[in-house]
Image: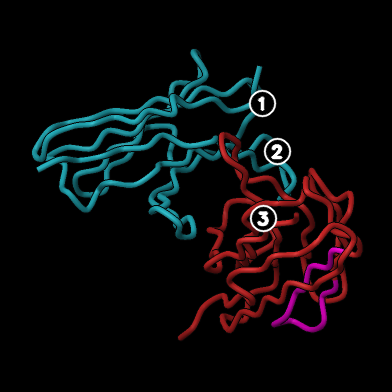
Amino acid sequence: NAGVTQTPKFQVLKTGQSMTLQCAQDMNHNSMYWYRQDPGMGLRLIYYSASEGTTDKGEVPNGYNVSRLNKREFSLRLESAAPSQTSVYFCASSEARGSNSPLHFGNGTRLTVT
Amino acid sequence: RKEVEQDPGPFNVPEGATVAFNCTYSNSASQSFFWYRQDCRKEPKLLMSVYSSGNEDGRFTAQLNRASQYISLLIRDSKLSDSATYLCVVNKGTGRRALTFGSGTRLQVQP
């Protein structure tokens, strides 16, 4: 049982390049999320999808887009990468829409934008 | 003031010691609280929820003090494997946007 799988694990981009971070979960969870984690700061929500077919902005959505491709997959796209987007990105899923159900995180993607 | 504040540490303790972390939150309307554990360069994992009456899970005890707006995590008989960063998470309302993560407290248990 893989849980939440993210790809790639590492990525280096030049300013202005684009890329898509992939995330898939095999737990039949309804809700999926993208967070970023920066040194000295807590995880911050970029976007989330409460259920298949819906997406909503989180705390720091600027510069990102998302697609909930189906119930399993939720991708995050950087259209024109900037150095400020250097971070560790975590995808997560949860069984229910409510905020009390545990978040299950993927292994993370370490992104560097030069 | 940050919504959720934690002492970043590190807390360096010997094996077998008891250690406690506090986490303060600014929104008095916060409704639910959690502790997550994050190992170095790994993903966060839920350690335990924090209930109003306090709760215990083995060597771990979580407490909530609504009057002073803080939660605590007590670890008894520390093990080397407890070395990690402990994230305080506060929910100030309904929905995922209401979840706020603290920046974490690093614990290093030494032999």
Label 1: chain letter: B
Q: Which chain is cyan?
A: B
Quote the CA–CA distance across marks 2 and 1: 7 Å
Residue B93's tag is 2
Circle 2 residues within 10 Å: few <14, some 14–19, many ≥20: some
Disc marking residue A98: 3
The span picked out in magenta is: A67-78
Asked if B64 appears above or below A39 in the picture, the reply is above
Colour-to-chain, red: A
Q: Disc 1 marks which residue?
A: B29
Q: Is residue B64 magenta?
A: no
Q: Residues within 10 Å of mark 1 (few under 14, many from 20)?
A: few
Chain for mark 2? B
A66 or A80, which is in the foreground? A80
B8 relative to A7 in the view: left or right: left
Q: Nearer the viewer, residue A61 or B53?
A: A61
Q: Kindly indicate the quadrant of the structure image that contains residue B91.
A: top right
* Mark 2 vs 1, N-terminal side: 1
**At numbered mark 3, what does the secondary structure look like: helix, strand or loop?**
loop
Check if mark 2's residue and mark 1's residue have beta carbons within 8 Å: yes
Residue A43 in which image quadrant: top right
Q: Quadrant of the N terminus of chain A?
A: bottom left
**Mark 2: amino acid:** Gly
Percent position of residue A108, x then y: 57, 64
